[in-house]
Image (tube, helix red, strand yellow):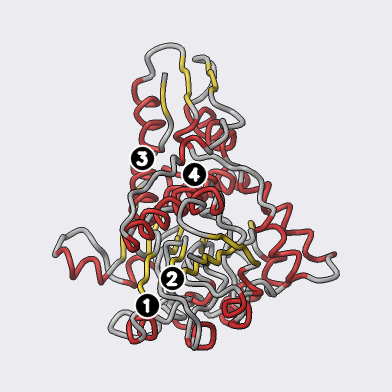
């Protein structure tokens, strides 16, 4: 069986070696000619590859898997019409994306001298990522407002707020899929009218999709509202992002919020198991045998360190968003900004999730222990 995969899917050769012949290629350079030449029957992609009739018509592909949470880059109607099986990796990198938000918020709190417990955070979209953000912020004692009309309609639960209410929050973080049709489209969910309803000093975080925000309207808002701050991991027209928007962002990163090694490997594992089900063979790949030890596995703190200092130190020991922000700022000097952006993603350093770190505390400090556990750390 011929398998063609994005080269940025980790351990894809090791995982699928017992299933077929695996060839890898750059996801952005994947074309129908390559798919035909490789005679691929199984295609494994990430979000940078549009999968539609232009890519697949006339090929041998019978199964498409995306190692991502979202699948707006796939033409699902076409796949269904052609009888092509499909699988995604829902929730695979949700923990990593939520940890990105926590790291960014702690950075902004330190930089601007505020406490998160003093702020109200509006969460737009409470699926796999948004629910994890809500859980971590609640563990830290932060008041949250949740806006998710499809989920509210599905569950019938109370506690959701309307759009105007969530837009009034001190901090707004976006965790929605990119939807262009239907009752609840998210394309340009934030445009001129909705951006005008945000607080003058709002902190806006987007780790969902670039087109959830009307970028021109956002640029206009940033030009006229000097108190507004943005943290952006996703951009319109990736990898050729708007240089001025990057300059204006308080933190800017190259679409890597969910790029923990744990999350990426989890996505590979979910696709591997889906392909095994599709061809009817038992899974034999042992993912844990592939994972390296985390760079830092244990931190110890004394009673002299303030609770907020412990949480921030533990978070940044695992992941500090500033590292990726500094890396992306080099885009301004790059001869080819698009290649530079993609290079940061392709050569992304190993990043492990909070659960890989054990935090040791002297004394009882029960409240701090519960907060650390709620954020995702192991506590000794």
In the rendered image, which residue does mark 3 sit on? 141
Are the residues at dot 4 and dot 2 in contact (C-beta closer than 8 Å)? Answer: no
Q: Position of residue 29 (x, y in %)?
A: 66, 74
In the rendered image, which residue does mark 4 sit on? 262
* Mark 1 or 3, nearer chain start: 1
In the rendered image, which residue does mark 2 sit on? 64
Judge the density around disc 1: few (<14), some (14-19), many (≥20) Cα neighbours within 10 Å: some
Q: Secondary structure at mark 1?
A: loop
Q: Nearer the viewer, mark 2 or mark 3?
A: 2
* Mark 2 or 1, nearer chain start: 2
Are the residues at dot 2 and dot 1 in contact (C-beta closer than 8 Å)? Answer: yes
Q: Secondary structure at mark 3?
A: loop
Q: CA distance from mark 4 to mark 2?
A: 22 Å
Judge the density around disc 3: few (<14), some (14-19), many (≥20) Cα neighbours within 10 Å: few
Q: Secondary structure at mark 4?
A: helix
Q: Nearer the viewer, residue 261 or 198?
A: 261
Side (left or right) of 114 relative to 121: right
* Mark 4 or 1, nearer chain start: 1
Q: CA distance from mark 2 to mark 1?
A: 7 Å
Q: CA distance from mark 2 to mark 3?
A: 42 Å
Q: Nearer the viewer, mark 4 or mark 1?
A: 1
Vertical position of residue 106 compared to residue 72: above or below: above
Side (left or right) of 36 relative to 334: left
Q: Position of residue 252 (x, y in %)?
A: 64, 60
Q: Nearer the viewer, residue 306 or 360?
A: 360
In the rendered image, which residue does mark 1 sit on? 84
Q: Nearer the viewer, residue 197 or 356?
A: 356
Q: How many marks?
A: 4
* Mark 2 or 3, nearer chain start: 2
Give me the residue at 40% from left, 83% from top. 180
Q: Position of residue 75 (x, y in %)?
A: 42, 82
């Amino acid at each position: 069986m011929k398998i063609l995969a994005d080269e940025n899917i980790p351990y894809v050769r090791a995982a699928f070696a017992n299933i077929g012949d695996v060839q890898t290629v750059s996801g952005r350079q994947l074309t129908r000619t390559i798919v035909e030449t490789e005679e691929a029957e199984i295609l494994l992609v990430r979000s940078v590859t549009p999968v539609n009739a232009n890519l697949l018509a006339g090929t041998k592909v019978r199964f498409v898997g995306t190692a991502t949470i979202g699948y707006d880059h796939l033409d699902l109607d076409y796949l269904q019409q052609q009888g092509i099986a499909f699988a995604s990796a829902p929730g695979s990198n949700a923990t990593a994306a939520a940890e990105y938000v926590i790291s960014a918020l702690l950075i902004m709190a330190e930089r601007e001298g505020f406490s998160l417990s003093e702020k109200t955070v509006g969460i737009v979209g409470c699926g796999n990522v948004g629910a994890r953000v809500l859980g971590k912020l609640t563990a830290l004692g932060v008041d949250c407002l949740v806006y998710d009309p499809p989920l509210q309609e599905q569950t019938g639960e109370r506690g959701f707020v309307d759009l105007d209410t969530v837009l009034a929050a001190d901090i707004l973080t976006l965790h929605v899929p990119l939807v262009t049709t239907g009752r609840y489209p998210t394309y340009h969910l934030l445009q001129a009218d909705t951006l005008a309803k945000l607080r003058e000093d709002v902190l806006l975080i987007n780790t969902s999709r670039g087109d959830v925000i009307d970028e021109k309207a956002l640029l206009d808002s940033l030009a006229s509202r000097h108190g507004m701050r943005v943290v952006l991991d996703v951009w319109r027209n990736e990898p050729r992002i708007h240089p001025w928007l990057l300059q204006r962002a308080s933190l800017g990163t190259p679409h890597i919020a969910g790029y923990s090694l744990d999350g990426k490997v989890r996505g590979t594992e979910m696709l591997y198991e889906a392909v095994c089900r599709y061809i009817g063979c038992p899974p034999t790949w042992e993912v844990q045998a592939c994972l390296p030890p985390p760079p830092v596995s244990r931190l110890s703190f004394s009673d002299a360190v303030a609770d907020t200092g412990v949480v921030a130190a533990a978070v940044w020991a695992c992941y500090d968003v500033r590292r990726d922000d500094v890396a992306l700022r080099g885009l301004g000097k790059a001869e080819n900004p698009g290649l530079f952006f993609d290079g940061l993603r392709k050569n992304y350093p190993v990043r492990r999730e909070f659960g890989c770190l054990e935090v040791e505390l002297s004394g009882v400090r029960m409240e701090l222990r519960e907060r650390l556990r709620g954020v995702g750390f192991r506590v000794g």
